[in-house]
Amino acid sequence: MRGLRWLLRRQDRDGGFRALWHRGVVPATVAVLRLLAALGRSRSPVARRALDRLRAAQLPDGSWSTGERGEPGTVDETARAVLALAACGDGAGAARGADWLLEHQRPDGSWEPGRTCVYIRDHVHYSDFLMAQGLALSALSAVSALPAPADPSEASDVSVPAAGAGTGEAR
């Protein structure tokens, strides 16, 4: 419990959390939200503030970016946010991000990784192809596992085919 209390005291005034090795508010905020959800605390005041911060960071197109002014959404940030929203039961927000991921999937089934990892703070940023693929697939899986919305107007266009189904196409 001491470790959890220590972690929760690191919450920013805006409700988010910051990571050392990643840019922006999304990665650390997501990590804390997923931890709180796993502990059954996704409705706690800390989690609600973090969710509000994460939702506020969503771009109009449904994606999330590293938070740099004018920077477009990235697969890495969007997939992380989708995972946290799904873990906390926000199916509508998660589905909107998943739709963006599907729209940005390449014809070969992969995704373009974002330059979100930091080697030297604010100087050297790098991409990780495998991390982007794993995050995107995990996010789509998390959304497909959510219960269907009670209100059909909240339904998304997200449809992830079952393993082995379909024609071999990426979508």
Image (spheres, rainbow, N blue to C red):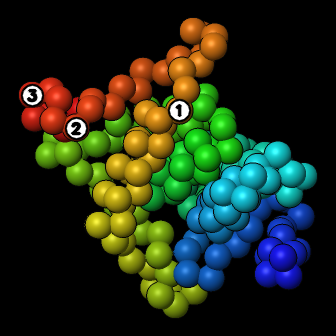
Q: Which of marks 1 and 3 is nearer the N terminus?
A: 1
Q: Distance between the residues labelled 1 and 3?
A: 24 Å
Residue type marked 3: Thr
Q: Tag 2, which secondary structure?
A: loop
Q: Which residue position is annotated with label 3?
A: 167
Mark 2 burial class by Cα count in 10 Å: few <14, some 14-19, many 20+: few
Q: Name the residue carrying label 2.
A: 163
| Amino acid at circle 1 | Leu
Q: Position of residue 92 (x, y in %)?
A: 61, 28
Measured in 3D between alpha carbons, the distance from the residue under mark 3 to the one under mark 2, in whole angstroms, is 11 Å
Q: Which of 4 and 49 is in front in this view?
A: 4
Instruction: Give the amino acid type for the residue marked by disc 2 in the picture.
Output: Ala
Which residue is at 9% across, 28% downward?
Answer: 167
Neighbour tally class for label 3: few under 14, some 14-19, many 20 plus, Cα within 10 Å: few
Label 3: state its secondary structure: loop
Asked if residue 58 lies left or right of residue 45, the reply is left
| Residue 60 appears in view | no
Please, is residue 101 above or below residue 78 in the view? above
Q: What's the CA distance linking mark 1 and mark 2?
A: 17 Å
Tag 1's secondary structure?
loop
**Res. 164 image quadrant:** top left
Q: Nearer the viewer, mark 1 or mark 3?
A: 1
Residue 58 to residue 9: above or below: above
Q: Which residue, given by chain and number where applicable, does mark 1 sit on?
A: 146
